[in-house]
Amino acid sequence: MMWRVLRPLDPYRSVKAALGWLVIISVAITTLLILMAYRSDIGLQVIAIIAIIASLLVTQFVAHSLATPVLEMTSAARAMARGDYGRRVRVARRDELGDLALAFNRMAADLQAADQHRKELIANVSHELRTPIAGLRAVLENVVDGVSEADPTTMTTALRSTERLGRLVEQLLDLSRLENGAVPLQPRGFQVEPYLSAVLNDATVALRRGHARTDVRFRLDVTPGGLRAHADPERLDQVVTNLVDNAVKHSPRNGQVTVVARAGQQTGGLVLEVLDEGPGIPHAQRELVFERFGRGTTNGVTPRDGGTGLGLAIARWAVDLHGGTIGVAESRRGCRIRLTLPGNAQANT
């Protein structure tokens, strides 16, 4: 109650309306004092003094009510400039200053989230870099100390660590370009079946070259056979490669990865699904896996598959560039990731 007395303008939805009411009240008080002077023996000088005091009190109330939220926001802004993004201002008004306070709090929350995201990104990048560097250092130290010989097996282990480092840096650069809008979109029409066949062939060659998961089989299902799509082939290659790579990493021994393509609702549209026979992704984590360094867990354990946790994030950004959607769909077995491209993507300049 006392707080409402000290800030009388809070209930009003407009500063202009509140000031208008204060002017009306001030005029009414002055008129009442003049009438009292005429009907009593009180002198005009006394009435003038009372009117001045009343005006000063009203002015003080108005100044306090207008200045308090501004001073609170000023104090909070200075705290944020020092790195304290947890400060918020009281939202007690319903006028323009109240709207400003709400906008200020939303801005502060966004800055706090961005700062937390930055800290998590630095921690995640540091962790991801530390693992391959530690492995490479251990191999080289063993060779230098004479514990291991520089034979093909040892060098292959070192090569895998450097490849993982290179893959992490490359994906970080790709994600940064996508987020900053620095990647131009150049859509064109193309035949889906030969395009996806080439992508899967490249994935097979990459797996054999890296001596990893050569037991996984690929199956391509395109309906109809002459299906055409309208998209950026380079960006779509990035999406499919990351989805296939993710599916291979989570496939069981001698498993199969299936790529299904069919026509979308619009001309040139495309619906693409990548299915594996792995453990799948729990419902609670189906959005997390598309975040940077977001990884799903199986039975509460995060898989140690050598991945960077960036592949699906890159896939989502590339699909967003096309104005499409991507997500985890229901599947009886394994994981099914479905993406939909509208077919009307426009080239970015």
Image: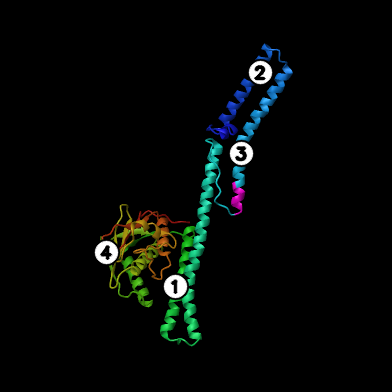
Mark 3 or mark 4: name the one nearer the start of the chain. Answer: 3
Looking at the rendered structure, the secondary structure element under dot 2 is: helix
Q: Going 41% across and 83% down the picture, which residue do you hit?
A: 153
Residue 68's disc number: 3
Q: Is residue 249 left or right of residue 23?
A: left
In the rendered structure, which segment of residues is drawn in magenta? 76-82
- Residue 293 in sight here: yes
Q: Is residue 81 magenta-colored?
A: yes
**Which residue carries the number 2 mark?**
33
- Main secondary structure of the magenta stretch: helix
Image marks 3 and 4: residues in contact by CB distance under 8 Å:
no
Q: Going 61% across and 25% down the picture, which residue do you hit?
A: 23
**Alpha carbons under labels 2 and 3: distance apart:** 31 Å
Query: Percent x, y for residue 160?
Result: 43, 76
**Alpha carbons under labels 1 and 3: distance apart:** 56 Å
- Residue 183 in sight here: no
Mark 2 or mark 3: name the one nearer the start of the chain. Answer: 2
**Alpha carbons under labels 1 and 2: distance apart:** 85 Å
Q: Is residue 92 above or below residue 335?
A: above
**Alpha carbons under labels 4 and 2: distance apart:** 91 Å
Nearest to the eye among marks 4 and 2: give it: 2
Find residue 278 and report its image quarter.
Answer: bottom left
Image marks 4 and 2: residues in contact by CB distance under 8 Å:
no
Nearest to the eye among marks 1 and 2: give it: 2
Q: Is residue 163 left or right of residue 243?
A: right
Q: Is residue 85 left or right of residue 336?
A: right
Q: Amino acid at mark 2?
A: Leu
**Which residue carries the number 1 mark?**
164
Residue 221's disc number: 4
Which is nearer the eye, 325 or 145? 145
